[in-house]
Amino acid sequence: MVDEVQNATAPADVPARLDRADGLSFAITTLIALAVYLFTLAPELTVTWSGVMTTAAMYRGIGPPPGYPAWTIYSWLFIKLLPFSNPAWRVAVGSAVAGAFACGLIALIVSHSGRISFAGLPAFERFSARECTLIRAICGSVAGLALAFSGKFWHEAVIQEWWTFTVLLFVLVLYFLSRWITTGRRCFCWFAFLAYGLLLTDNQELMIGLPGLAVAVMLINPKLGRDVSILVLPLGAVISSVTGYPLLAGSLWFRPVLESFAVAFFGALVIVIVMRRIGSEWKSALACTVFLCLGLAVYFYVPIASMTDPPMNWGYPRTVEGFFHVITRGQYERLNPTSQWARFGIQLWGLLKQTGREFGWLYLVFAALPFCFLWRMNPVGRKYVLSLLPILLCVGPLLSALLNPQMDRQSEDLIEPYFLALRVMLAVWAGIGLMLFATMTSRSAGLRNPAAA
């Protein structure tokens, strides 16, 4: 099924296939990151959850709430497929591979986004084909490696934990969105929801990002986004009620999950009123909903695995009570989102400082460039850059309000992995900003394509 509205705005001279620059950026970033990760890999068990998670992966058991079923299956494959060293090292290799592939996909997304954002524009057409390939491959690799060697991500990529696998699933969502907007094939939109469903089995906190994904679909294709929001958001509301992040968590004036869902649903209603039509894209919207449910269905692995009575069987989820205890994170304290504007402002400032310190202030400057020069992009590139903005608002400021972190350094270190999705978005924008900077500086230097002279 082809998205006619989307293809109508795409430049006619931009093929949908991935090209050499995309492959180079992916390969260079993945290989460099993986080589460094393997060289610095933890040889044995480390602190925090490493022993628990390794035991769960080794016996396909049930880890701490919410069970981490997708990560458990993924890590179990590495324990079985790698024929040497100890189980903890093999699980750490799985973390390294997931982290390296996530960074490689970021490089690919940046390279391909540059191709669709600047195709047909005079500023970019001055370069020869070889120069364009080099610019896109270098900018993509820089963006991917910026995340790969940021402090917390590197730390998580060499130990036995689930964070890099979670980031990989989040990057897959962005990758499928980019492929959908360039090819017009709606199966990529379905795959984005499938990846997001899998993501929620390992990181329930990102339930708050589901409305951002729905709004992103609305910005790319208003008709499909309208019908997706009407189907997916009520389902998400029901699902959130049986997790540790319900809609009504928070004070009367500020309930981050509820308000993110309400804003996205209100946007869909506005489109219904303006277009005076609803349900014209119900087939694709239903497919998105089904694929989201397929991803979430991995949760049913938890009671099935519990019936085998593995050594790690947290919460005994073979029973109904135990199952809901695990997926609702029953052993943890209930959420207490931010309830004061002043405190929320302090938390945002703390998040900005932490991101600048760990990810790099210079990259934040480049991440802002695409929004300063949106007029330099063609309509397709502009639409893709803007479609990522609602997702960032959900996995950044709103997530900070939901988690309500303390302001001391120890709390910041504990909460930092939850914002790796935010850094993924910033890395993508930083890579596109680097390409903008390259075109502007080359113009100032008077460089041009000899063939066009």
Image (cartoon, rainbow, N blue to C red):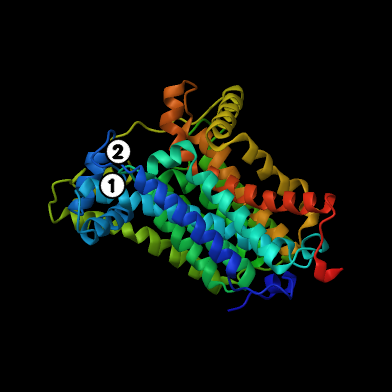
Q: Is residue 375 left or right of residue 159?
A: right
Work out which quarter of the rendered image holds the N terminus and state it: bottom right
Placement of the C terminus among the 4 image quadrants: bottom right
For the residue pair 171 and 289, the one nearer the viewer reads as: 171
Q: Which residue lies at the image location 28% right of the left edge and 38% below the top edge?
A: 49
Q: Is residue 47 placed above or below 291 in the rendered structure? A: above
For badge 2, the amino acid type reads Gly
Q: Please give the name of the residue rendered at 17% of the width and 53% of the height, measured from the top-left corner.
A: 59
> Which class describes the residues within 10 Å of circle 2: few (<14), some (14-19), or many (20+)?
some
Q: Residue furthest right?
A: 453
Q: Is 187 situated above or below 177?
A: below
User: Residue at 49% of width from left, 33% of height from top?
Assistant: 250
Q: Is residue 384 visible?
A: yes
Height in image: 145 above or below 274?
above
Callout 2: SS: loop
Identify the residue at the far top of this view: 408
Which sits in the foreground, 348 or 132? 132
Q: Name the spot of residue 300 as percent of width and height, x first.
A: 28, 58
Q: Nearer the viewer, residue 274 or 170?
A: 170
Q: Residues within 10 Å of mark 1 (few under 14, many from 20)?
A: some
Mark 2 highlights which residue?
Answer: 330
Residue type (three-letter) at the residue carrying disc 1:
Phe
Q: Which residue is mark 1?
A: 324
Residue 301 disc label:
none
